[in-house]
Image (spheres, grey):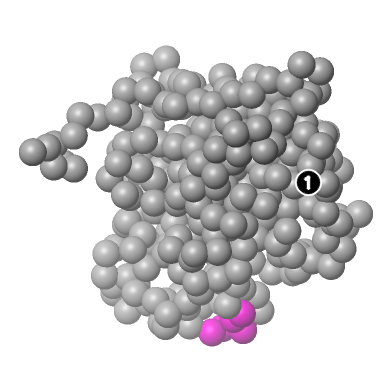
């Protein structure tokens, strides 16, 4: 009998594509970029069954579904295979790990599409939310010109909470690593470290939204993902599905920092869930040597991960955003 640990390393990605006979946009939907985040995988399995039965038809444009983007991490039931695929994403001329090989397949797929919906979940309890890219800009960090279309997509996905500021927060985090004098893997010090699927998509002329559908084991998360796919198909008019009304009221937040876990003995001050509010000066965690990590201002904890590996992201700090999503 072959056990899970004895199974051969995956050597391919399964890609499902449906091309309408009429021209239209090209939509790419991803699941299990992190192997223990399977809500998108389950939602796409349901949708593929409906497409195969003819209950839904792609009439224009192209729909590409990749239910399991990181098959090694999925096989292990863990966040990553060798490393986090959704950081420092880009083609690699000399692949050094499994995720590099995946990136060499995934990046051309991203570049060949117009719109991305990337379906994720998170470690601790919390409500679904969408990750939005920057406002239109011509800056060096993340130049972008499709903010209106991206905001319109976010408004139709369902969740009423929107978070932006991803690349800016990571730029601060990488700078802190570079200045710390501590030993880090080279990739963790790369200015491109914050680049994941959506950021790569924006850098190649398209736009994309990362939808965090709920906690990993939340039984409602696959339904959140399924509804989001259908809404995206309707919005882009790839099908004749009815488009539900857009959200008009949002909680808008901006990530302002990301804090690493330095040692396995670093501990949180309490059990945190995503978007728990904190007050300026409130203790968030404690380092192994007793140093307190406190909130720099009133704000919110995002993506707290008590099992974060040393040298990796421990939690994010967010504050209210003044961005207009109209």
Quarter assignment of residue 28: top right
In this view, 137 is above or below 104: below
In this view, 59 is above or below 306: above
Quarter assignment of residue 149: top right
- Is 43 positioned to the left or the right of 199 in the image? left
Is 233 or 303 nearer to us in this picture? 233
Quarter assignment of residue 83: top left
Viewport quadrant of the N terminus: top left
Residue at point 42%, 15% (across, down) = 93
Specify few, some or many for label 1: CA neighbours under 10 Å numbering under 14, 14-19, or 20 or more: many
Residue at point 69%, 36% (across, down) = 56
Residue 315 location in percent, x, y? 48, 64
- Is 258 positioned to the left or the right of 152 in the image? left
Residue picked out by circle 1: 153
Is 82 or 66 nearer to us in this picture? 66
Under circle 1, the secondary element is helix
Magenta residues span 277-282
- Is 191 positioned to the left or the right of 182 in the image? right
Residue 291 location in percent, x, y? 37, 77
- Indicate whether residue 280 is drawn in magenta: yes
Viewport quadrant of the C terminus: bottom right
Residue at point 55%, 64% (across, down) = 220
Is 66 or 199 nearer to us in this picture? 66
Residue 8 location in percent, x, y? 20, 29
Residue at point 54%, 44% (across, down) = 46
Residue 219 location in percent, x, y? 49, 64
In this view, 56 is above or below 76: above
């Amino acid at each position: 009998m072959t056990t899970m640990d004895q199974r051969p390393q995956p050597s391919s990605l399964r890609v499902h594509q449906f091309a309408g006979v009429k021209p239209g946009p090209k939509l790419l939907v991803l699941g299990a970029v992190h192997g223990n985040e399977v809500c998108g995988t389950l939602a796409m399995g349901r949708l593929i069954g409906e497409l195969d039965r003819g209950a839904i038809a792609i009439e224009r444009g192209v729909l590409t579904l990749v239910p399991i983007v990181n098959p090694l991490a999925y096989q292990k039931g863990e966040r990553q295979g060798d490393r986090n695929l959704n950081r420092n994403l880009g083609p690699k001329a000399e692949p050094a790990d499994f995720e590099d090989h995946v990136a060499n397949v995934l990046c051309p797929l991203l570049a060949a599409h117009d719109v991305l919906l990337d379906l994720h979940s998170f470690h601790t309890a919390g409500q679904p939310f969408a990750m939005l890219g920057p406002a239109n800009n011509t800056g060096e960090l993340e130049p972008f010109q499709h903010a209106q279309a991206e905001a319109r997509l976010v408004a139709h996905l369902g969740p009423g909470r929107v978070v932006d500021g991803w690349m800016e927060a990571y730029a601060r985090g990488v700078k802190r690593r570079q200045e710390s004098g501590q030993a880090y893997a080279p990739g963790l010090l790369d200015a491109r470290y914050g680049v994941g699927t959506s950021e790569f998509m924006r850098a190649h002329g398209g736009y994309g939204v990362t939808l965090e559908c709920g906690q990993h084991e939340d039984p409602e998360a696959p339904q959140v993902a399924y509804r989001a796919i259908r809404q995206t198909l309707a919005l882009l008019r790839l099908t004749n599905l009815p488009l539900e009304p857009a959200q008009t009221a949002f909680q808008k937040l901006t990530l302002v920092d990301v804090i690493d876990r330095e040692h396995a003995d670093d501990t949180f001050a309490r059990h945190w869930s995503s978007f728990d509010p904190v007050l300026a000066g409130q203790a968030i965690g404690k380092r192994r040597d007793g140093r307190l990590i406190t909130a720099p201002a009133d704000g919110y904890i995002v993506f707290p991960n008590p099992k974060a590996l040393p040298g990796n992201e421990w939690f994010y700090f967010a504050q209210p955003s003044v961005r207009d999503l109209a």
